[in-house]
């Protein structure tokens, strides 16, 4: 895909603390929003700061072409994201976007009763909201499988409930939904609902388990991969992943260039 990323100053509309270490940032820059697709990401740089020097890659959580606004759901994990929490409405951030390839449409058109499954673990719910909105507009039926450590770790549940999608929740401590991992009994659920495509984002262990659970099911499964990256444009070579080749071997690829959404059957997870 030809890179259409632009470097723009986006106006901060709101920087909302959700809970714990999680924040929701709302920005406005219409020229960027018009280029966005679900599953893509942005690189954010705080104006005037040289430490941290590098931009921070973050998933596009939601975007609205009419208003020119987009949202980034983020977790504080280091100096860059900690500094981001101090940004106020009315300030601006330097945004390089949109980056990467978005989620592709399901191979089959919408059909009554056929389900598309979105599977998230933790902060991996971030890029799936924009995808859910897009698929619902196109007429697909959705079930969102969402797993976390405990009920307090779930994010933006109300937003998904307002979309009217079916939610299947799982927690490791059993405090909400089924106890266990979100991939527990997933294979049976996908088969029972005649699932036609799967889209997932979350910890690498979850994505690896998902690939194993869906092996041989003849269902297209798309994984949104995450990795440390400095540029988002393929120059720093910091976000490599191993992909299978048609000849049966493997090759290195860059998540920022060929992802972040990559077919599960192509991804070579470390054993």
Image (cartoon, rainbow, N blue to C red):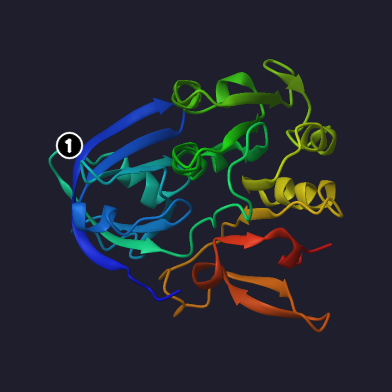
The one of 242 and 116 positioned closer to us in this rendering = 116
Residue sitting at x 76%, y 52%: 208
Question: Left of 157 or right of it: where is 177?
Answer: right
Q: What is the x, y in percent for residue 207? A: 71, 50
Outermost residue to the bottom:
247
Residue sitting at x 60%, y 34%: 142
Q: Residues within 10 Å of mark 1 (few under 14, many from 20)?
A: some
Question: Left of 187 or right of it: where is 24?
Answer: left
Q: What is the x, y in percent for residue 179? A: 77, 22
Q: For residue 223, which quarter of the picture? A: bottom right
Residue that label 1 marks: 89
The one of 191 and 61 positioned closer to us in this rendering = 191
The one of 120 and 107 positioned closer to us in this rendering = 107
- Quarter holding the C terminus? bottom right
Outermost residue to the top:
175
Residue sitting at x 31%, y 45%: 84
Count of numbered badges drawn on the protein: 1
Q: For residue 172, which quarter of the picture? A: top right
């Amino acid at each position: 895909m030809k890179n259409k990323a632009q470097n723009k100053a986006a106006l901060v509309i709101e920087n909302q603390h959700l809970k714990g270490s999680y924040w929701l940032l709302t920005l406005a820059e219409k020229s960027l929003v018009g280029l966005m697709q679900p599953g893509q990401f942005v690189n954010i740089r705080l104006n005037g700061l040289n430490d941290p020097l590098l931009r921070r890659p973050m998933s596009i959580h939601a975007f609205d072409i009419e208003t020119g606004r987009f949202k980034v759901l983020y977790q504080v994990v280091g100096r860059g994201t900690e500094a981001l929490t101090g940004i106020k409405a009315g300030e601006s951030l330097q945004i390089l976007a949109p980056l990467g390839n978005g989620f592709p449409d399901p191979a089959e058109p919408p059909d009554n009763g056929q389900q598309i499954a979105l599977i998230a673990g933790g902060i991996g719910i971030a890029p799936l909201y924009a995808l859910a909105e897009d698929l619902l507009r196109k007429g697909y039926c959705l079930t969102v499988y969402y797993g976390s450590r405990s009920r307090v770790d779930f994010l933006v549940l109300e937003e998904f409930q307002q979309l009217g999608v079916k939610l299947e929740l799982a927690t490791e401590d059993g405090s909400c939904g089924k106890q266990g991992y979100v991939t527990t009994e997933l294979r049976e659920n996908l088969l029972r609902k005649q699932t036609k495509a799967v889209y997932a984002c979350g910890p690498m262990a979850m994505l690896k388990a998902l690939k194993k659970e869906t092996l041989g099911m003849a269902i297209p499964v798309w994984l949104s991969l995450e990795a440390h990256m400095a540029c988002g444009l393929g120059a720093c070579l910091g976000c490599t992943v191993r992909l299978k080749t048609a000849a049966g071997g493997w090759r290195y690829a860059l998540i920022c260039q060929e992802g972040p959404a990559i077919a599960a059957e192509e991804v070579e997870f470390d054993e």
